[in-house]
Image: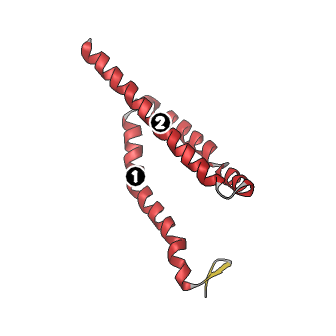
Amino acid sequence: MERVGPICISNTACLPVFTPGFLTAAGSIIASPYLEAVVANSIDDEHRAKMFSILQVLVLLFISPAGLIGGWAYTADPRLPFILMILAFTFSILLIIELMRREAKNISIEKAS
């Protein structure tokens, strides 16, 4: 048995426990600078600091209650957190598709003018 913080787990159980965290960290290291650069380049210089602070506050407002909502959903039904995640991802994909359509429409209107 290996002791990890207050939890004792067997050596064979460490890999599935820690692998998702390492993969998430690696993905964040790769994606975060690119995402921040894209956002920074799309905002005017004089408004960049204000927009970044508003963006960070909005992200924290949506992330902060996630643990509470996940715990409540799991208590109601252990499958419910996964269903909520699938619905959230589906909604975000549909939102991105709609934004891409609007952007393509705006580009085609500008080219026609």
What residue is shown at x 25% (from left), y 17% (from top)? 111
What residue is shown at x 65% (from left), y 52% (from top)? 80
**Which mark identifies residue 31?**
1
Mark nearer the N terminus (2 vs 1): 1
Between the residue at mark 2 and the residue at mark 1, the CA separation in whole angstroms equals 21 Å
What residue is shown at x 31% (from left), y 16% (from top)? 109
Residue 71 placed where, x, y %?
Answer: 70, 56
| Residue type, label 1 | Ala
Residue 18 placed where, x, y %?
Answer: 52, 71
Report which residue position mark 2 lands on: 94
Of all residues, the one furthest to the top in this rendering is 113
**Is residue 24 visible from the viewing direction of this image?**
yes
Location of the C terminus by quadrant is top left
| Residue type, label 2 | Leu
The crowding category of the residue bearing disc 2, from other C-alpha atoms within 10 Å (few below 14, some 14 to 19, many at least 20), is few
**Which mark identifies residue 113?**
none
